[in-house]
Image (cartoon, grey):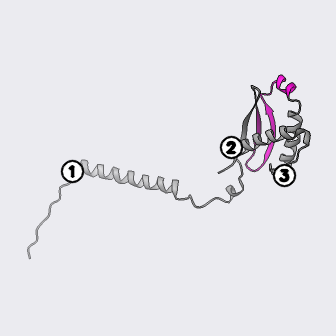
Amino acid sequence: MSSKTKIVVLHMKEVIYTGIFLVLAVVLAVVLFLMFGRGGRADAASADVLYHAGVYTSPITLNDNTFDVEVTVDEDHINSISLVNLSETTTAMYPLMEPALEALSSQICSSQSTENVTYSEENKYTSMLLLDAINDALDKAKVQ
């Protein structure tokens, strides 16, 4: 039996490049696992989160007068609803705007929902307009 000696010649440059590529492949695999590996499991703390905490606005335009309905939310509560950028002329032209919002705001903040909100017949269209703007702002705040 003859024994033949095999000689393998490795260039140091190739060994270093191979090592670097292996390290990068491992780092890429770890990053991909962290990004996509936990997608199916939800945390228990995030299960009751309804909104992204913050202040959300929805614009309303009435006869070239634009103002915003501002909704402030926590992760699980609607804290307040108010009108911002409301000029004095708009307040004078639409005197039912602020009382209608106060009535809606108290109902929505106490029930934490825009479902089954009641309003008077004299404020029907104003309340519907405000309720649509509040729902738009809450849609922006909702956790998907």
Neighbours of disc 2 within 10 Å: few (<14), some (14-19), many (20+): some
Mark 1 touching mark 2, by CB under 8 A? no
| Distance of label 2 from label 3 (alpha carbons) | 21 Å
Three-letter amino acid code at the position of disc 2: Lys
Q: Which mark is residue 140?
A: 2
Q: Can residue 121 be found in the magenta stretch?
A: no
Give the mark, 3 or 1, whose residue is nearer the N terminus: 1
- The picture quadrant where one finds residue 96 is top right
User: On the rendered image, what quadrant is the N terminus found in?
Assistant: bottom left
Seen as rendered, the residue at the extreme bottom is 1
Kindly identify the residue that appears in the image at 89 percent across and 41 percent down.
Answer: 103
From the image, tell me which residue sits under label 3.
116
- Left or right for 57, reference 27: right
Q: Is 69 in front, or is 46?
A: 69
From the image, tell me which residue sits under label 1.
11
Three-letter amino acid code at the position of disc 3: Asn
Closest to the camera, between mark 1 and mark 2, is 2
Q: Is 109 in front, or is 26?
A: 109
Q: Position of residue 91 (x, y in %)?
A: 85, 27
Closest to the camera, between mark 3 and mark 1, is 3
- The picture quadrant where one finds residue 54 is top right
Q: Can residue 84 be found in the magenta stretch?
A: yes
| Distance of label 1 from label 2 (alpha carbons) | 59 Å
Give the mark, 2 or 3, whose residue is nearer the N terminus: 3
Three-letter amino acid code at the position of disc 1: His
